[in-house]
Amino acid sequence: MSEIDELQKMISESRNIVFFGGAGVSTESGIPDFRSVDGLYNQQYAYPPEVMLSHSFYVDHTGEFYDFYRKKMIFPDAKPNKAHYKLAELEKAGRLKAVVTQNIDGLHQVAGSKTVFELHGSVKRNTCLRCGQHYDETFILKSAGVPTCTCGGTIKPDVVLYEEGLDQDTINGAVLSIRDADMLIVGGTSLVVYPAAGLIDYFGGDNLVLINRSVTSYDRRARLRIQGSIGEVLGQISV
């Protein structure tokens, strides 16, 4: 039995699937991986990316933060790929119960997924710190300098910056979904970013599947490991 056939069999026999994904899901939509050779962490800036994407830098250098954020964090032309669409299809069919993602691009929802736990937030949501009014990514892109609300308040992206904690409600939802799943598919992540990566430890079932281009520290625990493109692999699955 081929790896794809085995994956198909596992999916067909499961009724409570959860998908846990990382940057590799988005790279196939043209969004660069931070840690790849051409990724954000291997480019030269006035400050390290970790500094420019920190809470304190946002507070102390808000204008510079937004200059960087608009250029390197928002990809308005990115479209969902085969992985996004297949996951949405599996959810619509009642097999997939949740997507847990480390990505902030919102492409799972664009593809049609409804239950998505965005561990690191989303560039598609931005909130006024004074009155709480919400703004989309288009407003941020079209604004100049520091975007401000109609009330005069400063707008902040709903993304988790360095020095900030993850949203507890999002964590709780992800943990409960993973804990109750009868199959966990982990794709497009090297599982090195914590605390997000540690969430898969809550899965106690036997059907752990890892789909990634490179090896991970969890490979030995997987019932099935497929080395390759998450989009190409999931694109071959029938619902």
Image (cartoon, rainbow, N blue to C red):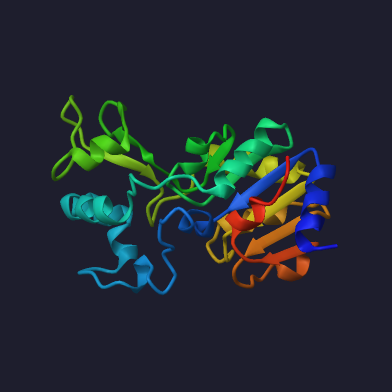
- Residue at x-position 72% and y-position 32%: 94
Q: Looking at the rendering, in which quadrant would you find the N terminus?
A: bottom right
- Residue at x-position 37% and y-position 52%: 161
Q: Is residue 15 left or right of residue 118?
A: right
Q: Position of residue 167 (x, y in %)?
A: 49, 42
Q: Position of residue 24 (x, y in %)?
A: 52, 60
Instruction: Tell which of 141 and 89 is nearer to you.
Output: 89
Toward which corner of the image does residue 215 lie, by quadrant? bottom right
- Residue at x-position 54% and y-position 34%: 112
Q: Looking at the rendering, in which quadrant would you find the C terminus?
A: top right
Toward which corner of the image does residue 115 lie, by quadrant? top right
- Residue at x-position 23% and y-position 69%: 45
Instruction: Tell which of 80 and 35 is nearer to you.
Output: 80
Q: Position of residue 90 (x, y in %)?
A: 68, 38
Q: Position of residue 26 (x, y in %)?
A: 48, 54
Toward which corner of the image does residue 95 lie, by quadrant? top right
Q: What is the tally of numbered marks visible in this picture?
A: 0
Q: Up-down: is 3 above or below 153?
A: below
Q: Is residue 19 left or right of residue 9?
A: left
Q: Is residue 217 left or right of residue 109?
A: right
